[in-house]
Amino acid sequence: MTTPPTNPIRWPAEALWEAVAPSLPGFTVEVLPEIDSTNTELMRRFRGSATVEPRPEPLLLVAEQQTAGRGRLGRQWQSRRGDSLMFSLGLPLAPADWSGLSLVAGISVAESLEPLLAGSSAKPRIGLKWPNDLWLSTPDGERKLVGILVETASWEGLRYVVIGIGINIRPVTLDPTLPASALASVPPGGLQELLPDVDAPAALLRVIPPLVQAVQAFAQFGFAPFQARFAARDVLAGRAVQLSDGTTGTAHGAGENGALLVHTAAGMKEITSSEVSVRPLTASPGSAAEGARPC
Ligand code: BTN
């Protein structure tokens, strides 16, 4: 049995609803003290309701704690109440092409947490690691700040998408018994290193309205309009990378459809599969040397 938390977290549910509902009719916000995984819960609800409810309403599900948080490629997402922000946005969506949605979510979150200053040539500290991670560059090297897990389900022609996002507000201590294959290629970081005053509720309020807008723009225009914004934060660009099938090459950014372009001995390869893991073989310039752990 888990001990009930003593310090209540004040979530900005009403402010979020006011900011989002005008452009996303039917939108609601729900906060749960604990759930296995917000992605799993939204998928369960979609599958359970699909036969009775013709069109599920858009829902933002926030969990203060997850007991079975999931990451990409079957990995776990580890978190701690208050130190991590965990939520999933579930909504019906009908883009002409689904490629690049996870990148768009990442671009939006990165820009909300660290807007690029007009005219500044300074390198942003929040970078995007294709396809679904946000990395923070620190004096000690790169740290994983955000993980994104996009899942879809369909019922009689209706596609429902769940965009699950985990943000480390303070670095989590990883379970030391986990094998290297279950870990990201960089250690966890914390948003408070960049924004000391931002806690989980404040980060949620900052991130959600632009995320909804970005998802709606993606549904209408696809990934192409986001390509340059991805490039501005692409942490793999120009770096030697290794794919999970062992192929090595140099990363050349994301194409118009969001595919990762990798120059290999056999020519330019377009990596689209979400089943492929890509890890840099070299540390970014100026960062501490990085171990060769899979992401
Ligand atoms: C990854 O890094 O591989 C993706 C991690 C995604 C974690 C978030 S936390 C909220 C939502 N619920 C989950 O179980 N996973 C996502």
Image: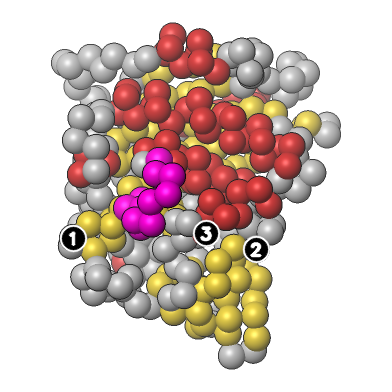
Name the N-terminal-most of marks 2 and 1: 1
Report, in whole angstroms, how far the alpha carbon at label 3 lies from the one at label 1: 22 Å
- Location of the N terminus by quadrant is top left
Report how far apart the C-alphas of labels 2 and 3 lie in the structure: 10 Å
Identified at 42% across, 63% down, the residue is 235
Q: Which residue is mark 1?
A: 139
Q: Does 91 sit above or below residue 143?
A: above
The kind of residue tagged 1 is Pro
Q: Magenta region: which residues? A: 115-126
Q: Is mark 3 within 8 Å of ligand 1?
A: no
| Labelled disc at residue 20 | none
The residue depicted at 58 percent of the width and 81 percent of the height is 263
**Point 74% across, 37% down: residue:** 220
Pointer 3 residue: 231
> Of 241 and 276, which appears nearest the observer?
241
Kindly indicate whether the residue at mark 3 contacts the one at mark 2 (C-beta within 8 angstroms). Answer: no
Quarter holding the C terminus is: bottom left
Measuring from the top left, give residue 32's x and y in whole percent. 39, 19
Q: Earlier in the sequence, mark 2 or mark 3?
A: 3
Q: Residue furthest bottom?
A: 265
Callout 1: SS: loop
Q: Is residue 101 visible to us here?
A: yes
| Left or right, residue 286 beside residue 119 | left
Q: Secondary structure at mark 2?
A: loop
In this picture, is 196 found above or below 266? above
For disc 2, the marked residue is: 255
